[in-house]
Amino acid sequence: MFDAKKFIDKTVAKLKEDVPGKALIAFSGGVDSTVSALLVNRAIENQLIAVNVDTGYMRKNEPDNVKKMMKELGLNFRFVDASKEFYRELKGVEDPEKKRKIIGEKFIRIFEKVAEEEQIKYLVQGTIAPDWIESGGGLRDNIKSHHNVGGLPKTMTLKLIEPLRDLYKDEVRKVARELKLNVSERQPFPGPGLAIRIIGEATPERTEIVREACDIVEKEIERAVEKGLMERPWQYFAVLMPVKTVGVHGDKRAYGNTIAIRAVQSVDAMTCHYSTIPHEVIDTISTKITNNLKEKINRIVYDVTNKPPGTVEWE
Amino acid sequence: MVRIYVIDNGGQWTHREWRTLRDLDVDTEIVPNTTPFQDLQDEEINGLVLSGGAPRIALDSNLGNCAEYLEKAEFPVLGICAGHQFMAKFFGGWAEPSKIPEFGKVELTLLKEGDILFDGVPKKSIVWESHNDEVTILPKLFDRLAESENCKIQAMRHKNKPFYGLQFHPEVEHTQHGEQIFKNFVKMCEK
């Protein structure tokens, strides 16, 4: 069986050999990068710099929460607001693979810039097994290019360090619990962020819509879990579909977009089944989203696809 | 410690096979399917898993060095998905694109009681699938062990050798008795 304590000891010892000096970590505030940060920081005695990038495709209040978290963890950190640049690079881009590749490359260029200023040669990433498996290569087909693997540019100056490469999320959570990290039970959030929860072009306006919808889905599902109405899903969010349908708002015709609710149960993200959300909870989510987003959204659907054949995120 | 290697045919779940074996305290490694058989023998392995993969067995005739492994192995071999389809073709059976491919949740029905690979697995259980092709003609030297509604050859066993083929995926979390199947396979390799 996987032994978190042994893993920590072995990994810290190996990192001491592999990383002879300062390093930089791509820090999102999720469980993978937080665990990686702590392990590396321990190995190189606080010579780690955590870099968090606001891509503009973050969840509601995420940049503030991450800043707070980096302080609490006692990490040396840099916060980069690159939202305008990301929006500009993704202008007119609809293809999901193109979105992922553009975002992956942009991340690296930002890290390279910080690394140059700080004279750092090593880039730590919280890559876990499904990231490189699904990114493909060799015999393995490309399912989607995870920003930290398949989204990496062909040429980069930094040397990659990925201490969690052979682990799945349930194992990373075990390590996080062993390290007593609050982040251990946090739901996964993809590196490309809300950009891949917007089908079609990820404009700032459409990002605001899906950001609000994701926030409502998260809050209502968390409330239902606390009340004991349902099991905590592995991941739960909203997707903005470019499908317009007719509705009626206060005796007037409405013609707005559609939001899909997605919630799945899984242990390791390699197989999933859709979550059974009680109708009363879906009902509340549906009413809140359509009322808050008014003319923008007038239809809500629920995604009942397992993995396979679906994947968790839509893009 | 029993040593079982996983031959990587490029599957999404190859690494899951490795993890399942490791969790059962097996000495295990993932090796590319181009590894010569002699290298495996030099490592003194006790069993082999042939993973699934993106290659279409119904359309291609080769799968790395898998033919050499099946020709020479005297230890147990477990072929999964593409590995299973390749095993069927190697021994004179056939694989073709499925009329109705299966993705995700499927009910498996065991046809024979008492086979050691399915020891402790009930007659009906939930398994997880992901295949475009399937075995359509059972090789003469094999017995059919399990089926589903849309796929008649979900599991097969060589009559004289410890070789098994499974169309479904025992290595994923969502397959109800997958770990039990792996435990049984490991036991077979220990002998």
Image (cartoon, coloured by chain):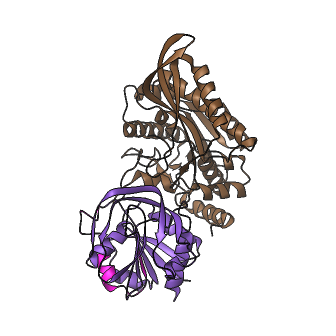
Residue A261 falls in image quadrant: top right
Residue A256 or residue A70, whichever sits in front: A256
Residue A17 or residue A300, whichever sits in front: A300
Q: Residue at x 52, y 10 (%)?
A: A252
Q: For residue B125: magenta?
A: no
Q: Residue at x 33, y 69 (%)?
A: B85
Left or right placement of residue A255 versus residue A227 in this view: left
Q: In which quadrant will I find the N terminus of chain A?
A: bottom right
Q: Residue at x 49, y 84 (%)?
A: B189
Q: Colour of chain B?
A: purple
Q: Is residue A223 above or below residue A20?
A: above
The answer to whether residue A39 is visible is yes
How many labels sit on residues? Answer: 0
Left or right placement of residue A143 versus residue A289 in this view: left
Q: Position of residue A149 (x, y in %)?
A: 44, 49
Q: Colour of chain A?
A: brown
Q: Position of residue B156 (x, y in %)?
A: 39, 76
